[in-house]
Image: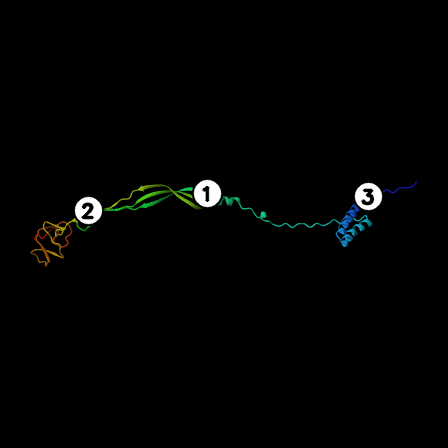
């Protein structure tokens, strides 16, 4: 009885794989040969022949270069949306300020004052105004300011100045009862004074005794 050779399953698998590799190598060599590259064909056919001679050899896996990652503009860190929103935030608020209002001056004639003399009858006082603004802030920085209201909270007081119109009679207004002349010095007539001007009394002192006529200080001068 003749015996029949039955190949092992693993041997068959290796053989099929080897044949596939050999076929691929042959096709590669054929393509290179068509381009006129005989050395490349021989190099591609040699590994295939070695694998056919040694079916048990396991083909070495082909190494593949790993691509290097390159940073692009899309990989840049994204802007913080919170910071961007804060820079664009618009806030409106109301601000109140106080402004001064200047007073005016008015002059009025006064016949009780000697001509050319002045006197303040009413003191002037500045007024006040309250201003209300709408202020716009963009990102914390003022970008607009609009006046929405103006109210006078204190009216100014006009200064009143009296201007004398009284014509001088040549008599000093500090005395009455007799005309005391206006001079560099006045003495009582009949006294020991040396003038240059004199007055005969009695004279009543109604203002300042600028000529010192009332020696005893009783308000009446030149009464001796």
Q: Earlier in the sequence, mark 1 or mark 3?
A: 3
Graded by Cα atoms within 10 Å as few (under 14), some (14 to 19) or many (20 or more), the crowding at tag 2 reads some
- Residue 181 vs 10, above or below: the answer is below
Graded by Cα atoms within 10 Å as few (under 14), some (14 to 19) or many (20 or more), the crowding at tag 1 reads some
Q: Label 1, label 2: how many angstroms apart (C-alpha)? A: 60 Å
Residue at left offset 34%, top offset 45%: 99
Q: Residue furthest right?
A: 1
Query: Where does residue 185 sit, x and y in percent of width and height?
Result: 13, 57
Query: Where does residue 21 sit, x and y in percent of width and height?
Result: 78, 47
Q: Label 2, label 3: how many angstroms apart (C-alpha)? A: 140 Å
Disc assigned to residue 12 = 3
Task: Residue 9: name its quadrant.
Answer: top right
Disc assigned to residue 109 = 2
Q: Earlier in the sequence, mark 1 or mark 2?
A: 1
Residue at left offset 46%, top offset 43%: 90
User: Where is mark 1, residue-wise?
Assistant: 90
**Is residue 80 shown left or right of residue 137?**
right
**Is residue 125 shown left or right of residue 92?**
left
Graded by Cα atoms within 10 Å as few (under 14), some (14 to 19) or many (20 or more), the crowding at tag 3 reads few
Nearer to the camera, 43 or 118 = 43
Q: Label 1, label 3: how many angstroms apart (C-alpha)? A: 81 Å
Residue at left offset 43%, top offset 43%: 136
Query: Where does residue 216 sit, x and y in percent of width and height?
Result: 11, 53
Nearer to the camera, 175 or 219 = 175
**Is residue 62 shown left or right of residue 93?**
right
Q: Earlier in the sequence, mark 2 or mark 3?
A: 3
Q: Residue furthest left?
A: 190
- Which element carries disc 1, helix, strand or loop? strand
Q: Are marks 1 and 2 in contact (CB under 8 Å)?
A: no
Disc assigned to residue 14 = none
């Amino acid at each position: 009885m003749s015996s029949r050779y039955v190949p092992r399953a693993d041997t068959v698998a290796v053989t099929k794989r080897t044949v596939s590799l050999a076929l691929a190598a042959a096709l590669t060599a054929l393509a290179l040969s068509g381009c006129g590259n005989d050395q490349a064909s021989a190099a591609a056919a040699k590994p295939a022949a070695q694998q056919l001679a040694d079916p048990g050899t396991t083909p070495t896996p082909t190494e593949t270069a790993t691509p290097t990652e390159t940073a692009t503009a899309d990989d840049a860190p994204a802007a913080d949306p919170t910071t961007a929103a804060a820079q664009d935030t618009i806030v409106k608020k109301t601000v109140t300020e106080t402004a001064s209002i200047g007073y005016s001056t008015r002059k009025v004639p006064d016949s009780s004052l000697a001509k050319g003399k002045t006197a303040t009858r009413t003191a002037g006082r500045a007024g006040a105004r309250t201003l209300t603004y709408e202020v716009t802030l963009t990102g914390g920085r003022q970008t607009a300011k609009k006046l929405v209201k103006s109210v006078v909270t204190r009216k100014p007081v006009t200064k009143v100045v009296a201007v004398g119109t009284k014509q001088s009679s040549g008599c000093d207004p500090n005395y009455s009862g007799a005309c005391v002349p206006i001079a560099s010095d006045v003495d009582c007539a009949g006294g020991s004074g040396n003038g240059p001007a004199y007055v005969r009394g009695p004279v009543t002192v109604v203002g300042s005794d600028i000529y010192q006529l009332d020696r005893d200080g009783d308000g009446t001068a030149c009464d001796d």
